Image: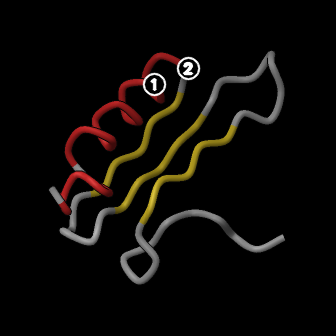
Amino acid sequence: MKNLAPTSDAPGLHVSKPSPSEPATASAVCHCGASATAKGDTQVGALVAGWTANHGTAHGK
């Protein structure tokens, strides 16, 4: 399987939760240069909320 982690050449948001008993993980890289990682369901939720509000398509507004 192709590595789905975002990079500066392919920015984006990647979230993984292999099973219900394991914590979620996430990584994000924006075309503006910002990047972040998170581990744990709560922290991943916060990263996704921040990405949605401040990066990704938010830059187009």
Under circle 1, the secondary element is helix
Under circle 2, the secondary element is helix
Which image quarter is the C terminus in? bottom left
Q: How is the image coloured?
A: secondary structure
Q: Comparing marks 2 and 1, which lies closer to the viewer?
A: 1
- Vertical position of residue 9 compared to residue 16: above or below: below
Q: Residue furthest bottom?
A: 9
Which image quarter is the N terminus in? bottom right
Report the residue marked by disc 1.
45
Q: Residue at x 58, y 37 (%)?
A: 25
Residue 32 screen position, x and y as percent = 18, 68
Report the residue marked by disc 2.
41
Within the image, what quadrant is residue 29 found in? bottom left
Q: Residue at x 69, y 70 (%)?
A: 3
The amino acid beneath tag 2 is Asp
**Number of marks present in the image shown:** 2
Q: Is residue 41 left or right of residue 47?
A: right
Few, some or many C-alpha atoms within 10 Å of disc 1 (few <14, some 14-19, many ≥20)?
Answer: some
Q: Residue at x 66, y 24 (%)?
A: 23
Q: CB of mark 2 within 8 Å of CB of mark 1?
A: yes
The amino acid beneath tag 1 is Gly
Residue 28 screen position, x and y as percent = 41, 54
Residue 8 screen position, x and y as percent = 36, 77
Q: Is residue 11 left or right of residue 31?
A: right
Marks 2/1: CA distance?
A: 6 Å
